[in-house]
Image: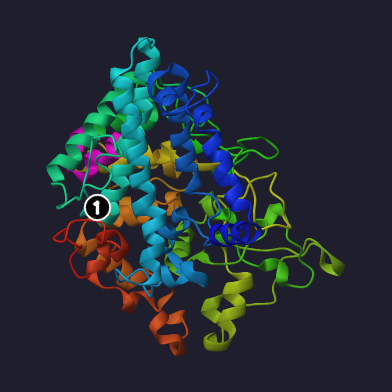
Amino acid sequence: MNTENFYKKLKGSGLLLILLIFAVSCEDFLEENPSTSIDADYIYTTEEGLKSGVVSLYKFERDRYQRSTEDFMGAVLMSSRSDLAFSRTGYTGLMGRYERGVSPVDQGANFVSSLFWKHFYNMTNKATAIINAAEVANGIDEDVKNQVLAEAKFFRAHSYFYLYRMFNNIYVNTETVTVENAFNVVNDKSSEENIFALINSDLDFAVEHLEWTDTFGRVTKGTAKHVKAKVAMWQGDWVEAKNQALDVIEGPDSPHSLVSSTAGVFAGNRNNSESLFVIQAEDDLLGGGNTTMMNANYVTQYFQISGIEANIEQGGRGFSRILPNLYLLNLLAEDPNDTRDDDTYFRLKYYYTSGDRIGEELDDYAPITDLDNPSTDYARYYQRMHPSCIKFAQEDDNPDSYLNRSNITVYRLAETYLIAAEAIMRSTGDPLPYINAVRTRAGAQPVTSVNQQTILDERARELAFEGQRWFTLKRMGQEVIDFQITNYAGDGEYFPANLGSKDPRTNWQPHYINWPIAQIDLDLLGPNYPQNDGY
């Protein structure tokens, strides 16, 4: 019920007065401190309280992948803005085509504010409060304290790293937010040096104190080393990136290995030897998480075709918002033996499930490249027949619902191999064994040489739609992201000419390399706090 309406009803009935009298008469009682109460002191000073606080950080992280009031998640939004995607419809499509989220005052910027800026700052504030409390807590087992600090510092580093890569002009803070300082004004962004100093310090602690193995869903030494390698790449420290990645891949204590086939990467609950961090969700379990639309965003509406019902084998129930574009599909098709487009990462074909043609391949529509009249035929092709990304379909999903609880992979070892290959290429050593390990697992022929484009293409084939592409393009520089977006985003010549402004290639502006800081957030900062260039 709306709070204002609730109190209007109370006033109208005279109940508000009764409540006020009751509150005054109970004043002495309310001043008592019963032993069963759980307050901030409990969280800040007890072992169980600190451990509970850390668990809440995992809940913060999980929220990014689960259903939001806007029916799309921050994790989905990042995949829409890349050179690998065709963003078809919905607000996610508008964002992916650079029609929204391109001004500090448009609704897209407000969504970005809640899904990223506020989300990650809330997470850093929570982590900082836990860190500062744990560091001065008395009577806490030292191993428990270090575990709490390691996990909290990982999430603080992870959050600031995400914010920096999105917005560039960010500030970092290591002071616990209190009633006294909550309204202090931040007047300027932090320097890049200070941002990376804090991120690296936090990650160093996490690497030192986390174990290689833990309950699935908890961050480990491998998770921290993987992120440390990514951070080093942003700093151009290729030796550090190489060393961290190789320790995860082939260090004597690392438990991680690539699964044997692409079919196994996203099979089951994703908790396998390749997984470095997986969001956990479970049906019919208190604390099992909310529902997610991750899969629905990436799967086409093939079930609208007569004779095909929604089923898990073909991807479940989707609404065709973000689809692999021709550029990505052509990269996958370069090697006919590559299994990543063989119903493992991507599904290219659909089959009848009822009527006289059960089991037959759908052949009603030609590929988009062969359509006689794209401006009229494109809608049904992209909506119903286009290849889908099926990385987020889980075997126990409900095929009749867009909403499901599913485990979601955040970081995995295949990316660590590609980090190692790039870092070695840019420093010393032989990158071929690492990039070819990923290709061989997929059934593709090994490459014989490696350059930046080789790395970029292989990351596309292996990691598309896993939330990494935008950051990879940005890290490689303005020239790279400009070229990739203006040449490959969307579907270019096959995109209907009469839709004009919906082409991301022509909508792209170089300053979009940084997202705008929403005006609603700038208004809370100092008057001279810098907006990103171009906005």
Looking at the rendering, the stretch of residues picked out in magenta corresponds to: 228-241
Specify the quadrant of the image occupied by residue 77. bottom left
Mark 1 neighbour class, 10 Å CA radius: few under 14, some 14 to 19, many 20 or more:
some
Q: How is the image coloured?
A: rainbow
Q: In the rendering, at what x and y percent does residue 341 appear?
A: 54, 55
Residue 370 at least partly seen: yes
SS state under label 1: helix
Total labels: the figure holds 1
In the picture as drawn, the residue positioned furthest to the right comes out as 356
Q: In the rendering, at what x and y percent does residue 320 appear?
A: 58, 67
In the image, taking residue 19 as reference, residue 48 lies left or right, namely: left
Give the quarter of the figure containing the N terminus: bottom right
User: Up-down: is 318 above or below 157?
Assistant: below
User: Up-down: is 25 above or below 366?
Assistant: above
Specify the quadrant of the image occupied by residue 403. bottom right
Q: Which residue type does callout 1 highlight?
A: Arg
For label 1, the residue is: 475
In the image, taking residue 430 as reference, residue 264 lies left or right, namely: right
Q: In the rendering, at what x and y percent does residue 10 appear?
A: 61, 56
Prevailing secondary structure class for the magenta stretch in the rendered image: helix
Question: 215 or 8: nearer the eye?
Answer: 8
Q: Residue at x 38, y 24 (%)?
A: 44
